[in-house]
Every structure is written in C-alpha cells, then in structure tokens.
C-alpha cells in the first residue's frame, strides 16, 4: 500500500470518529477541514495509483461528506435555474 492510500484510510477513520463526536454546528467546521485535507489527498492518490483508484477514493470521500455535496448541487441548481441573473 502506498503512503497516499494509507493517508486516505487514515482520513476515512478520522472522518468516522469526528462523525461520532457531538457537535453544536452539526459538524460543518469539521467538514470544511476534511474537505481541505481531502482534495489534495485525492489528487495525490490519483497521481500515485492511477485514475481508477483515485475515483474510488473520491467516491468514498463523497459518501462520507454527502451533505456538503448535496448542498453544493442544490446551490448550482438554484444558480442555473434563474436566467435573470
């Protein structure tokens, strides 16, 4: 296993532990940190292991951080449906 895959596994464990802890802001601050760490990590995994493994790691990250992705798609949808802007 490469170092990038090991760190990706550590990222997933860290995200799971954070999800189990209580939070006043529904884990949004932790989600921002996980996103900031996860984007370069997915790039590194893709660089070292190829695009197929990179897509698997990306899918795992999206499944863990599904609500920020859902809100992002809702935001894109609301921006595209209003032609007056």
Image (cartoon, rainbow, N blue to C red):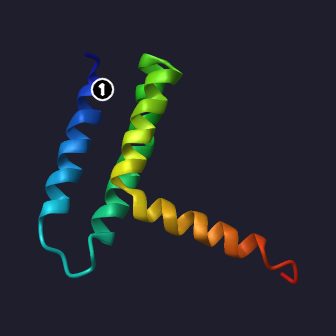
The quarter of the picture where residue 4 lies is top left
Q: 2 and 55: which one is in front? A: 55
Q: Residue at x 44, y 64 (%)?
A: 68
> In what element is the residue under mark 1?
helix
**Between residues 33 and 56, which one lies in front from this camera angle?**
56
- Pinpoint residue 35: horizontal percent, then vertical percent: 39, 54
Q: Is residue 30 left or right of residue 81?
A: left
Residue closest to the eye, 36 or 19 = 19
50 versus 6 height, above or below: above
Q: Sort mark 1 into few (<14), some (14-19) or many (20+) by Cα contacts within 10 Å.
A: many
Residue position for label 1: 5
Residue at (87% x, 78% y) in the render: 83
- The x and y percentages for residue 21 are 12, 66
Q: Quadrant of the N terminus?
A: top left
Q: Residue drawn at (19%, 52%), measured in percent from left and top?
A: 16
Q: Tell me the quarter of the image containing the C terminus.
A: bottom right
* Residue name at image x 14 percent, y 54 percent: 17
Q: Is residue 21 left or right of residue 42?
A: left
Q: Is residue 77 above or below residue 47?
A: below
Residue extending furthest toward the right: 84
Tally the marks: 1
Q: Is residue 79 above or below residue 36?
A: below
Residue 22 percent coordinates (x, y)? 13, 73
């Amino acid at each position: 296993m490469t170092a990038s895959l090991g760190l990706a596994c550590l990222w997933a464990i860290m995200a799971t532990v954070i999800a189990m802890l209580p939070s006043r802001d529904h884990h949004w601050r932790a989600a921002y940190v996980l996103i900031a760490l996860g984007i370069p990590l997915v790039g590194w995994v893709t660089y070292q292991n190829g695009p197929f493994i990179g897509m698997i790691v990306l899918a795992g990250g999206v499944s863990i951080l599904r609500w920020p992705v859902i809100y992002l798609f809702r935001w894109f949808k609301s921006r595209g449906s209003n032609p007056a802007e």
